[in-house]
Amino acid sequence: MFNARDWLAANIQAAAGVSDQSWETVAGFALLWSLFEERMCGTEAKKDVLEDIARQYTARTLTNDMQSAYAYWVDRYLIAEGAATKFDELFDRLSGKADVQAILIDSSPALDRQVFALLMIVYRLRNNLFHGVKRIETFNDQGENLQMASRALASLLEHFGIH
């Protein structure tokens, strides 16, 4: 059986330094995203589709995992040292950037706006990972970020009855 991880470690120098935890985190995120996009986005995730999903979120609050991810990303992209640079790197394209920034800055955004911000951040992480912006050399540094994204996706899938 072909093992992509073994092949990468043998043929791509940077892959040899990727931890077991990082391999698992990246693979888990990729699988959750694939399920989310197929089941919730009609295989075409984009800003307006994510806004529609956010509007359909009917709970009165975010789940604990979604709250944790939201707080983590407020800190990562607004408060922590280097936050502005990280936010600019996440949103290398303008689509949704101003919307998400305004939501994260707002001290009490509407629930559907919080869900939209979560989805846009996860979407940008997906785009950056799948389109090469997140180089393999950075996988060990992306663990918590992708764990938060995976937890938020899993919570949304559960909320919408996709188990």
Image (cartoon, rainbow, N blue to C red):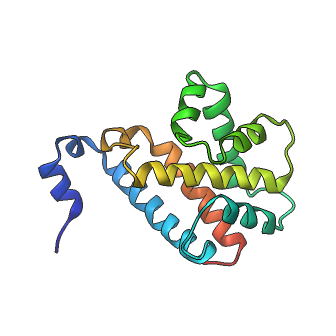
* Quadrant location of the C terminus in the rendered image: bottom right
Q: Residue 122: x, y in percent?
A: 58, 53
Q: Is residue 117 above or below residue 17?
A: below
Quick one: which residue is furthest to the left in this view? 10
Q: Is residue 18 above or below residue 52?
A: above
Between residue 82 and residue 3, name the one nearer to us.
82
Q: How many marks?
A: 0
Q: Which residue is drawn at 39% across and 60% down?
A: 27
The answer to whether 30 appears left or right of 116 in the picture is left
The answer to whether 142 appears left or right of 153 in the picture is left
Between residue 26 and residue 117, name the one nearer to us.
117
Quick one: which residue is furthest to the top in this view? 81
Q: Residue 105: x, y in percent?
A: 77, 34
Q: Which residue is drawn at 16% across and 75% down?
A: 1
* Quadrant of the image occupied by residue 78: top right
Q: Residue 129: x, y in percent?
A: 42, 50
Q: Residue at x 52, y 44 (%)?
A: 145
* Quadrant of the image occupied by residue 52: bottom right
Q: Residue 58: x, y in percent?
A: 83, 68
The answer to whether 35 appears left or right of 153 in the picture is left
